[in-house]
Image (tube, rainbow, N blue to C red):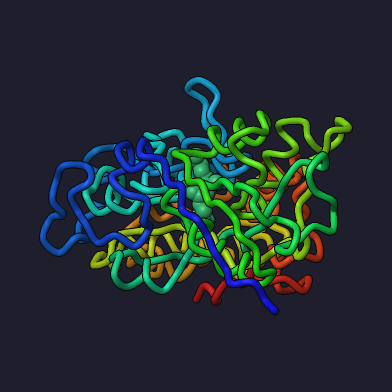
Amino acid sequence: MMKRLTVLLAVLALVAAACGGSSDDTTSDTTTGGTTPVGQGGGTLAEVIARGNLNCGVSEGAAGFTNITGDEFSGIDVDYCRAVAAAVLGDPNAVVFFPVSSANRFDQLKARVFDVLFRNTTWTASRDTDVGMNFGPTTFFDGQGVMGPSSKFSANSGPADVDGRTLCTSAGTTSEKNVAEWASLGGATIILKTLDNNAQVYEALEAGVECDMATTDASNLVGERFERGHFNAGQDWVIFPPENISKEPLGPAYREGDDQWGDIIDWTVYVTFIAAEKGITSANVQAAVDAGGDPELLRMVGVENSSIVADLGIKPDGFLDVLLQIGNYDEIFARNLAPLGIVQAGSLNDLYTRGGLIYAPPFR
Ligand SMILES: N[C@@H](CCC(=O)N[C@@H](CS)C(=O)NCC(=O)O)C(=O)O
């Protein structure tokens, strides 16, 4: 007979104190001490232009998405922050990054601490509704995985092998919420421990005392396993099959009630997809524009039907700056994710023209 599922919550008191709660679907506006301005959204473009820089919410550290070394930021999420700054201000460096925890990200966005959130954030129904976010195009189709050391698990481990084990993840994530459904498949009793951030989770997994396993977006498991040397170093961390136990479409979130700003975020992302479809890169875009052959490219860079770009409210050549300075989706993927062993070809993150899900509406 199936054993009844028990998931024990061992949420550290410290986490609750530091994060103001561990739920990702809180509707509270007061975590950061302020209240949400009336109407929430509205006027973000004008604020960014007047300020002269974009304030962008990012992770406190997620391999390949937000890497932070001293004052240097890189990663796919960081590149998309820079792309928005290039589109609006013509300068990909006109960004102030705001690293934010999983638990605080939506409250801080609503409190206008930053203008947009690019933080390995999953688009879900409750975040779209009660939490008051709007979501832009998915920039990485992910799924949740579970990983543990090969000293305790095998590459075939699954829910049936985790009885009595401690599983760690970050507070305020979809990862935390999906776990119970996964464990129930094997009727296992697991102890779920939520920590403040990624670094704490993986350090605890390395120490092997507090955490037997870690769970979160598979891209993060793969990236951190690579960066921490647990892949090729003979002390492997294994990701259990099936590698994806949930759908985690990751992309930008922005405040409800500011359609103009939402359009700018969406079309900045789409322009990087369309350029990839056309093989237009940072290296060849200027020549392609000068050659004048591709009408859709000429519309994107404001040379033809310039009212489209003007109606968005960005600089006429804003998207040319995006492509010159940041590049297309394939370039962004190759720069940030491929070095960690995250494969684009044949995955959901390939262009639709190559069998994946990366697809943009036409620019006309
Ligand atoms: N995509 C999931 C998970 C996002 C998430 O916050 N993941 C953790 C990994 S355990 C993370 O990136 N933490 C980064 C940090 O510590 O700043 C969500 O939106 O809830």
Please determine whether, in this image, residue 272 is positioned above or below residue 334.
below
Is residue 330 shown left or right of residue 238?
Answer: left
Residue 293, quarter of the rendered image: bottom right
Q: Quadrant of the N terminus?
A: bottom right
Nearest the camera: 109 or 298? 109
Image quadrant of residue 94? top left
Q: Residue at x 15, y 64 (%)?
A: 39
In the rendered view, does 135 fall on the left or right side of 296?
left
- Which percent across, then down, holds residue 296? 58, 70
Tally of marks: 0
Q: Is residue 253 above or below residue 90?
A: below
Residue in the image at 22% along x and 46% along y: 31
Residue 46 x %, y %: 22, 51
Residue 147: image x %, image y %? Answer: 71, 49
Q: Is residue 108 above or below residue 196?
A: below
Pick out the residue farthest to the bottom. Answer: 1
| Near-viewer residue (258 or 29) | 29
- Residue 325 point in image, percent of width and height: 56, 41
| Position of 342 relative to 67 (above/below) | below
Task: Give the left or right position of residue 145, taking residue 27 as reference.
Answer: right
Please tell me which residue is depicted at 27% across the width and 51% down the height of the picture: 107
Residue 296 seen by the camera: no
Tell me the quarter of the picture where residue 312 sits: bottom left
- Furthest-left residue in this view: 38
